[in-house]
Amino acid sequence: MNNKTKNDVKFKSGFVSIVGRPNVGKSTLMNTLIGEKIAIMSDKPQTTRNQIRAIYNSDDLQIVFMDTPGIQKPKNKLGSYMMKASSSSMKDTDIILFVVDESKRIGVTDKEIIENLKNNTSKKILVINKIDKINKEELMDLINMYSEIGIFDEIVPVSAIKGENSNTLIKVLSKYLEEGPQYFPKDMITDQPEKVLVSEIIREKILMYTDQEIPHGIAVEIEQMKKRKDKDIIDVSALIYCEREAHKKIIIGHQGRKIKGIGKSAREELEFIFGNKVFLELWVKAKPNWRDKENFIRTMGFDDNK
């Protein structure tokens, strides 16, 4: 493929892995850079479970971002899968974006990630997120603290939630990418199947509506997703798995109010995304300890052997 644009400008492309501990804003950052909602967001850690690819396109640049689960010690088989997904993303990638937040000290998990990065030959960009929460003097202290480590090619402060410095970060990434092919069509912003996106949106709404009542022991399986032949309506039937009967009651809520709220919120977002009316049915089933059942997590699209 010709790697030149109409003005004979070099076309650059490459793969960028976004890594970091849970809850530093990796998914929010990726969504901001792409300009579309690709990954679900929550203020709870470990929201992202799969490696999600999102594609940034311009006339002379294509960046394939890989958002990964937050790196932490796994507590079950699903956690092991997520840990491997994060670790594998740091291999065979052009640039690693290591995202940290405004914390004034480098925590244990961040130190472990930094030690792993020291042996990695990819370019390394440190992104200090959530700078809207600190003043300029505090930011300079953070930049100096991380600069002393000596492994980062550049340090870019951003506020992903406000979009501050997102264009600067794209320019920095472009500087370190080389001339290459267009890996995906220009109008493509993610390689995630529609069913995966739908299930993730439903899961996000559950996290929002249940607040601290439900831990991350939920999964969503799309049993049916089909557009009607005679009407401009998409029928979606989804099964929500939780780990306890008590959690099932919480998700459903008194007289079904909570599940109705979850469904309404998910349906409205799906209708916006697809530009179609959506008829959404949600069912809830308790499946004890599903995160430790290897066969089940594989049927849900996870595989800790990958």
Image (cartoon, grey):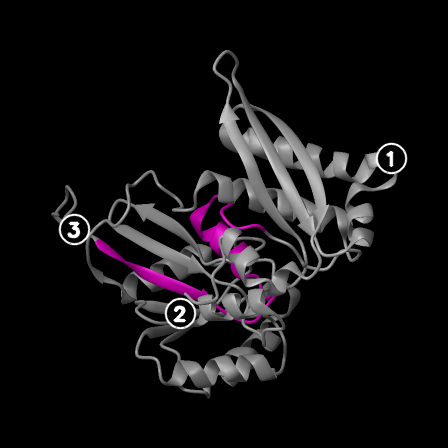
* Location of residue 65 with respect to 71 vertically, above or below: above
Q: For the residue carrying disc 2, how many other residues have a C-alpha within 10 Å: few (<14), some (14-19), or many (20+)?
A: some
Q: Residue at x 53, y 84 (%)?
A: 111
Residue 53 in picture, x, y percent from top left: 41, 53
Q: Identify the residue under disc 3.
A: 9
Labels 3, 2: front one: 2
Whole-percent x, y for residue 279 in the image: 62, 25
Give the residue number, with chain letter if any, for mark 2: 88
User: SS for tag 1?
Assistant: helix
Name the kind of residue labelled 3 in the image.
Answer: Val
Q: Residue at x 75, y 46 (%)?
A: 209
Residue beneath the point at 33% across and 46% down: 57
Q: In the drawing, does residue 66 fall left or right of residue 158?
A: left
Which label sits in the foreground, 3 or 1? 1
Q: Residue 6: say if magenta.
A: no
Q: Residue furthest right?
A: 254
For the record, the magenta segment spans 12-40
Mark before the other along the chain sequence, 1 or 2: 2
For the residue pair 197 and 134, the one nearer the viewer reads as 197
Q: Quadrant of residue 130?
A: bottom right
Please report whichever mark, 3 or 1, sits nearer to the chain's N-terminal start: 3
The circle drawn on residue 255 is 1
- At horizontal 33% and vertical 38% (from top left) the residue drawn is 187
Say what amino acid the circle numbered 2 marks.
Ser
